[in-house]
């Protein structure tokens, strides 16, 4: 399973492509791709988001369900999903719905 991620240019926030084609701030709200061909088609179309300067660095990441939550499988992406590692009261891990909160 894969999702598409990027950074929002307005504020640098890590975002994921949602089911409705809008960028969402929580990986659990991302559109999950099972088929590689569909993923590649959507990835190519998301260059438009970069051209409109909404996001930068669009790419795919591997995800899996862990304890009922959609979670990135690589450490780097798990860190990006939670926010900065400098303090647990900053970033996405500080949100009430975060599994790390």
Image (spheres, helix red, strand yellow):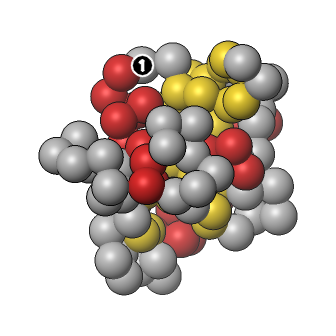
- Side of 47 relative to 45 (left or right): left
Q: Residue at x 36, y 21 (%)?
A: 75
Q: Residue at x 39, y 65 (%)?
A: 13
Q: Is residue 84 above or below residue 90?
A: above
In this rendered view, identify the residue nearer to me: 16 or 89: 89
- In the picture of the structure, the residue carrying the numbered disc 1 is 74
- Side of 58 relative to 49 (left or right): left
Q: Residues within 10 Å of mark 1 (few under 14, many from 20)?
A: few
Task: Residue 8: tell me if it is visible.
Answer: yes
Q: Is residue 85 above or below residue 74?
A: below
Q: Percent x, y for residue 49?
A: 53, 71
Q: Residue at x 57, y 46 (%)?
A: 98
Q: Residue at x 73, y 51 (%)?
A: 29
Q: Percent x, y for residue 64?
A: 67, 19
Q: Is residue 77 above or below residue 57?
A: above
Q: Is residue 45 above or below residue 41?
A: below
């Amino acid at each position: 399973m894969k999702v598409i991620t990027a950074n929002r240019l307005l504020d640098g926030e890590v975002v994921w492509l949602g089911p409705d084609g809008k960028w969402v701030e929580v990986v659990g709200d991302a559109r999950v791709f099972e088929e590689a061909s569909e993923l590649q088609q959507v990835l190519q179309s998301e260059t438009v988001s970069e051209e409109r300067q909404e996001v930068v660095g669009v790419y795919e990441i591997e995800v899996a369900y862990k304890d009922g939550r959609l979670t990135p499988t690589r450490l780097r992406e798990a860190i990006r999903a939670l926010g900065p590692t400098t303090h647990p009261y900053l970033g996405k891990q500080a949100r009430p719905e975060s599994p790390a909160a």
